[in-house]
Image (cartoon, rainbow, N blue to C red):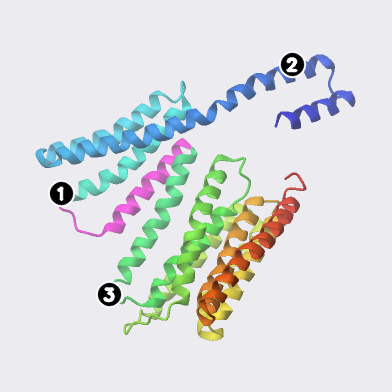
Amino acid sequence: MAEKWETWLARWNDAGLIDAQTAARVRTYETTHADSERLRWPIKLALFFGALTLGAGVLLFVAAHWDELSPSLRFSLVVFLVAAFHVGGALTEKRFPAMAQSLHAIGTVALGAGIYLAGQIFNLAEHWPGGLMLWAFGAALAWVLLKTWPQAGLTAVLAPAWLIGEWMVAIQRQESHRAELVIPAGVLLLALTYFTSGSQKHDVRRTLVWLGAIALLPAALALGIFAGSTYTSGQSTPNSLMVVGWTCAIGIPLALAFVLRRRAAWPNVLAALWLIVAVNLRSIGGEVSMYAWWAVGATALAGWGVADGRSERVNLATAIFAATVFTFYFSQVMDKIGRSASLIGLGLLFLGGGWAIEQTRRRLVSRATGGLS
């Protein structure tokens, strides 16, 4: 970064846009603040682990003494914990904003524990997704009021968790394979929407990108397993319920993509069409066609990354493509040849295939970043 702004500073000075005195002041300012920027990551790490251990310690303390408390004292303790962290965040907002964000995040996490503990205290009717709904609503309200990325991240996780919970309760008596497929399909499309949400210069967008990157591979693996499974159930889910499930699984991620990317969201529509084909392809084209279709999807994600100049999409697409190739070899090729030949082929695949994939990845990343890496 220092080399980049030094280059621009020299260009502006040579072009007469700034004088030598201004250039010296800019250089002094950037050098001073560069030192403080280098110290930010240890502080963030300390705040993260501090918030994690503080929250865990409080929960363990409450759990250890829970049976000894009366119902009224239990409820008072739950309310106090939720309020105390948010009050602490408000008091430290001006002096230490990062600390305030951590305390507010712990308060929102404590809200979820408080909701379920309150239900246990008063023996409320059991519908566990309702607790997630209230928790997600609390996180969303905190996001609106505080406008910080931890609250946005909690909302982005809790809202889909609530919808998944509602769907699990709705289909628990049917146990239909097609109904169960809705969850990984919706999670994959939503993770892709998060992952491609836009510039990482904005804190909330950067949070969504990280959440999408973390969830995308597990969701892709789950969808591949569920879509390729031959499991069938004797019971079937009503068509009206399936329409609701698939409408939410596809419609919500697409609506969010249009909110985040506007007219640039058309690749998300293609991704939804790819998903629809992926969940129905095995019954039409057989198992081998599924591997080819996943390779097409990985290639399209890499092309999307090159078009938008996003190297992280190229890297993740490379991982999906490599996993598809190796899974195809293990499931379709390795058990059809001898042991020694299969091991030789596996070695050649790792060496030759790994080299070819890495070279392709480097070229695509270079194109995505304009030759800067």
Query: Spatial distance from mark 2 to mark 1, Cα to Cα?
Result: 64 Å
> Given the image, on which type of amino acid does mark 3 rest?
Arg
Q: Nearer the viewer, residue 324 or 338?
A: 338
Quadrant housing the N terminus? top right
Is residue 273 at least partly visible in the picture? no
Judged by its main secondary structure, the magenta piece is helix
In three-dimensional space, the C-alpha distance between marks 3 and 1, rounded to whole angstroms, equals: 28 Å
* Tag 2: amino acid: Arg
Rendered residue at 39%/60% (across/down): 163
Task: Determine contact: label 3, label 2, CB under 8 Å.
Answer: no
Of marks 2 and 1, which one's residue comes earlier in the chain?
A: 2
Q: Which mark is residue 122?
A: 1
Q: Answer with left or right where residue 308 lies relative to residue 181.
A: right
Q: Is residue 192 visible?
A: yes
Q: Is mark 3 on a helix, strand or loop?
A: loop
Label 3 crowding class (10 Å Cα cut-off): few <14, some 14-19, many 20+?
A: few
Picture coordinates of residue 264, whole percent (x, y): 67, 57
Please identify the residue farthest to the right as the structure is shown: 15
3 vs 1, front mark: 3
Sequence order check: which comes first, mark 3 or mark 2?
2
- Which quadrant would the C terminus be assigned to in this image? top right
Q: Nearer the viewer, residue 349 or 210?
A: 349
Residue extending farthest to the front is 340
What residue is rendered at 42% in x and 81% in y? 230
Residue pointed to by mark 3: 173
**Magenta-drawn segment:** 123-147
| Secondary element type, mark 2 | helix
